[in-house]
Image (cartoon, coloured by chain):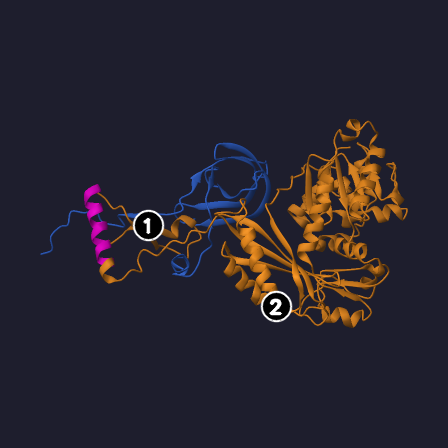
């Protein structure tokens, strides 16, 4: 008979990395970011370097995001996204999908 | 007038002709000797007429223009001359932005009044001073914002050629300057060719394919149409064509550079005495108070030849260094095939890209099995003492996911 270890089942102790952080963003009527508060400072967005959209898991909790790589007036580059389901903005660095093992090998080197 | 744009057309060729007047009127190709595996970095109008363009291989340039004079690429020399030009302007303007070698944007707001002159005379005097101090022919455009000033300087040959000008803003093309009075920017820009718009050259070609040859035609197109066709570049072009320019001058940052130079005791043609001299110079430069305790990314090395020519090489280190021997080792590898046209009379070095030392983090886990066990025990004790995991490792969860927060996670070490 196996003893009950009395620990919770599931992926306990797993802490997901690169969680999105809520961001204060001022958007244009077309939905593009125009200004953002970054490190407590209101800064205009000088340029949008890239933009793409992600739609996933529409069959359960729908994920619909529009990402923007922006350059603030201070010269800093940020990746922001607008959650198209709730209309809220977040900051999150973005790495595209990759084959298993790529990141860890890269970091070890 | 708030802003001015100063341009020395074909800067590299202009420098060559200033220092060697005998080259005037001859085809010049810069980038190296024709047998080198390199590309053309600049060429004179005479060489361009023979079909040479920037980016052409030097061998092809020789085939296209056999009579051309081929000049070595002297990056450090061009950089020095560009800085000198910027310095001359900086003495007369509080805000200067070096856009490219021989291309400067600077603020002139209120300066004419300070000098007790009107804008026209102030600009004329400024241009004359710059030309006299640098020995280079320059074009100058002045306006209330950056783009009209830039467009005026860029399109000056066209204005000089008598391009039509509704609301003519008192240009004086023969003198190398154009002033665009406030409020007339849109009219001035309207007749200029679309090539003055600072967008991808491919867009210039596409605009012309659409039959849009003048900035005024771009301004007349609905913004939505231009944006749909060209994206953000379309919006920028439309804004600029309509005289809306919100860009501002970004002042250049002074970069610390340490230069040491010496005359050789006797002219040298072989590499060894040059290396000895270079080592002495590097040691002297590295002892400079501005660099002590720091590392450098770039080394510019040059020789002054007895013939009056200069040979230069730039070394960019993969990792910043403050070790003179390492610098010499890398430099020597660059000089393997150096053939001097005359004996060297002087040698010099400039260190730049000064930064703090790179930290090298050792890998904690590559320390042998015994140490590994001790480390695991220490981590287990730490976790037991604090009451939870304290050391984690990164694991892939769903690396294939398009959702960034699903890709990686931290998991307690040893679990």
Instruction: Please tell me how crowded label 2 is: few (under 14), some (14-19), or many (20+) other residues with Cα within 10 Å.
Output: some
Residue B332 at what x, y percent from top left? 57, 66
Give the chain letter for orange.
Answer: B
In the image, B158 versus B340, the foreground residue is B340
Magenta stretch: give its range: B372-386
Dot label at residue B271? 2
Mark 2 vs mark 1: in front: 2
Residue B384: within the magenta? yes
Q: Does B190 appear above or below B325? A: above
Element under disc 1 = strand
Residue A61 at what x, y percent from top left? 39, 45
- The residue to which callout 1 is attached is B410
| Chain of residue at mark 2 | B
- Judge from the rendering whether residue A68 lies leftward or rightward of residue B40; answer left or right: left
Residue B353 at what x, y percent from top left? 56, 50
Provide the major secondary structure of the magenta segment.
helix
Instruction: Please tell me how crowded label 1 is: few (under 14), some (14-19), or many (20+) other residues with Cα within 10 Å.
Output: some
Res. B58 visible in picture: yes
- Judge from the rendering whether residue B34 lies leftward or rightward of residue B123; answer left or right: left
Give the chain letter for blue.
Answer: A
Res. B242 visible in picture: no
């Amino acid at each position: 008979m196996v003893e009950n270890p009395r620990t919770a089942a599931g992926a306990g102790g797993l802490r997901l990395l690169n969680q999105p952080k809520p961001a204060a963003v001022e958007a244009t009527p077309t939905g593009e970011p125009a200004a953002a508060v970054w490190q407590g400072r209101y800064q205009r967005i000088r340029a949008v370097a890239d933009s793409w959209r992600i739609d996933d898991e529409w069959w359960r909790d729908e994920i619909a995001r529009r990402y923007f790589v922006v350059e603030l007036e201070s010269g800093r580059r940020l990746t922001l996204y607008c959650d198209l389901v709730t209309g809220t903005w977040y900051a999150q660095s973005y790495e595209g999908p990759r084959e298993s093992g790529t990141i860890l090998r890269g970091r070890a080197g | 007038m708030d802003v001015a744009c100063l341009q020395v057309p074909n800067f590299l060729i202009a420098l060559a002709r200033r220092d060697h007047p005998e080259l005037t009127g001859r085809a010049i190709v810069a980038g190296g000797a024709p047998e080198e595996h390199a590309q053309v970095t600049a060429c004179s109008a005479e060489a361009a007429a023979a079909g040479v363009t920037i980016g052409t291989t030097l061998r092809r340039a020789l085939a296209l223009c056999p009579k051309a004079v081929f000049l070595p690429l002297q990056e450090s020399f061009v950089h020095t001359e560009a800085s000198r030009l910027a310095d001359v302007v900086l003495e007369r303007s509080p805000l200067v932005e070096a856009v490219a070698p021989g291309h400067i944007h600077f603020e002139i707001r209120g300066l004419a009044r300070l000098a007790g002159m009107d804008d026209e005379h102030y600009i004329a005097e400024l241009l004359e001073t710059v030309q006299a101090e640098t020995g280079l022919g320059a074009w100058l455009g002045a306006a209330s914002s950056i783009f009209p000033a830039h467009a005026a300087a860029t399109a000056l040959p066209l204005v000089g050629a008598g391009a039509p000008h509704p609301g003519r803003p008192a240009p004086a093309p023969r003198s190398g300057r154009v002033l665009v009075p406030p409020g007339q920017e849109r009219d001035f820009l309207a007749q200029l060719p679309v090539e003055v718009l600072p967008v991808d050259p491919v867009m210039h070609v596409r605009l012309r394919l659409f039959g849009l040859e003048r900035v005024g035609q771009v301004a007349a197109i609905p913004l939505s149409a231009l944006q749909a066709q060209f994206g953000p570049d379309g919006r920028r072009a439309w804004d600029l064509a309509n005289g809306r320019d919100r860009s501002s001058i970004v002042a250049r940052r002074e970069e610390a550079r340490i230069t040491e130079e010496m005359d050789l005791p006797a002219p040298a043609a072989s590499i060894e005495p040059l290396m000895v001299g270079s080592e002495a110079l590097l040691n002297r430069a590295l002892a400079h108070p501005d660099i002590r305790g720091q590392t450098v990314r770039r080394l510019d090395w040059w020789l002054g030849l007895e013939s009056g020519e200069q040979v230069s090489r730039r070394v960019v280190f993969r990792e910043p260094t403050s070790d003179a021997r390492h610098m010499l080792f890398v430099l020597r590898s660059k000089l393997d095939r150096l053939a001097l046209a005359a004996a060297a009379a002087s040698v010099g070095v400039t260190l730049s890209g000064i930064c703090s030392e790179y930290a090298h983090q050792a890998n904690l886990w590559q320390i042998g099995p015994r140490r590994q066990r001790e480390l695991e025990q220490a981590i287990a004790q730490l976790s037991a003492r604090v009451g939870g995991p304290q050391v984690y490792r990164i694991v892939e969860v769903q690396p294939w996911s398009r959702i960034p927060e699903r890709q990686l996670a931290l998991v307690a070490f040893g679990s």
